[in-house]
Image (spheres, coloured by chain):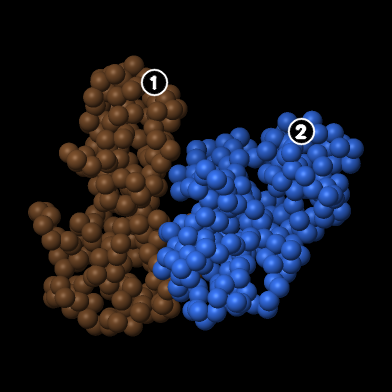
Chain colours: A blue, B brown
Amino acid sequence: MATYKLVISYDGTAYHGFQYQENAYTVQEALEKAIHKLYGEMIRVGAAGRTDAGVHARGQVVSFRAPETIPGERLGQALRGVLPRDIVVVEAGRVDDGFLSRKDAKGKVYTYTIDNGPHKDVFMRNYSWHLPRRLDLEKMQKTAILFLGEHDFKSFQAAGSPVKTTVRTISSLTVTKKNRFVVLRFEGNGFLYKMVRRITGTLARVGLGKREPGEVLLALRDGERRFAGPTAPPGGLCLEKVLY
Amino acid sequence: MATYKLVISYDGTAYHGFQYQENAYTVQEALEKAIHKLYGEMIRVGAAGRTDAGVHARGQVVSFRAPETIPGERLGQALRGVLPRDIVVVEAGRVDDGFLSRKDAKGKVYTYTIDNGPHKDVFMRNYSWHLPRRLDLEKMQKTAILFLGEHDFKSFQAAGSPVKTTVRTISSLTVTKKNRFVVLRFEGNGFLYKMVRRITGTLARVGLGKREPGEVLLALRDGERRFAGPTAPPGGLCLEKVLY
């Protein structure tokens, strides 16, 4: 037996998230089915980040243990032949035993894309959140700075997710505009359930002039949940990279 | 009765092209169904360019005649409410009687996108042609120049399309690279059936070192069909703009 690591990219539109579910098709199931075709046995995989239904990934990292029947350098090619069209293997190879994609991750990079054009960009309809009203980019950028560093993000997590601590560190949060698209890029040591989408929803409200930076501070510092959110829709979110 | 003009954008992936077909779902049918919902009657529409199955449009122009029940400035909004998610109205309004999207078009702009990355970009899988081998961009650019101006493009049309003349003028053909994507941009007074995709296929072979510029000249000047093509797949093609 040996340990293998994959970097995969997927269009999450057709999936009910990454993680296995009894009654819904997930990326994990698609991946395990493909791996089953190669090894002839059921092998469980683990992912660095459990993306939700409709959320995408450019650099999701997956690890699993399997027999040494396929050389590490041939694994990517083999998997590409059996995976569905909306999951692509970017990198694949053997790694040191004991590697765990989730536990060993030091941080993650996510992007959230807002389509700020007057009408929806049809080619980006599954990969962005369409907000036709003009966003005040400067105000969003200034408010984004408030999230930097270590904070208790309990107001920015979705209810019902048990975690030991809700303290996380965001090392970078940028808001940039390219043509009609406003892209928020988050880098941090970890993110609570729906945290990126709730921060995005909050910053979008700031950009629309419906929330003030002072209110965001109240949500962040004093845990005033009513000033946090709403949760931005899943399609705009993409797990870009896992840092080790 | 009045004449109306639409500029529409669509993801052609799910359609068997623009033009109505008895046994297949097309953009025209989707559009006419939506218009039927607004006017309560069947109205025929005409498009500037008849895109093939799987081909996309960012600026397709459509014209039709309809009763004056919906003001021109409200037509776009009304259509957006009844069209499927993969067809978006960019502009809509009333125009002078006698306007015909196809007949009045002075020219068209198409782009063809090649994904030249080592592995397929999963988000561009329906909007590009994946060619993992390195393309010689300079050679493609130099060969592209041969197509400029007025030529008899008979070697670059697909068989079985009756046209009065196969002479067309390409006023601009650029080959640019942005990150992993090579984009060919065509501007001309008109294009024969599958002509953009055959020129793209030809230039791709040049980029891969499998065809020489001299051979392309033979296809173009002397009608040597065996040096033209292959026809690039439909997904990479997009009708960007119709010129009037």
**Residue A184, x across and y down, in percent:** 67, 51
Chain under callout 2 = A
**Residue B82, x across and y down, in percent:** 40, 28
Instruction: Write the residue at 61% across / 35% down.
Output: A133
Rendering quarter of residue A174: bottom right
Chain under callout 1 = B
Whole-angstrom CA distance, mark 1 to mark 2, is: 36 Å
Name, please, the residue furthest toward the top: B69
- The type of residue carrying mark 1 is Pro
- The type of residue carrying mark 2 is Arg
Kindly state the secondary structure of the residue where label 1 is placed: loop
Instruction: Write the residue at 64% across / 77% down.
Output: A95
**Residue B8, x across and y down, in percent:** 38, 40
**B125 left or right of A130?**
left
Rendering quarter of residue A66: bottom right
Kindly state the secondary structure of the residue where label 2 is placed: loop
Quadrant that contains the C terminus of chain B = top left
- Report which residue position mark 2 lands on: A211
> From what the image shows, is residue A16 above or below residue B166?
above
> From what the image shows, is residue A98 above or below residue A203?
below
- Report which residue position mark 1 lands on: B71
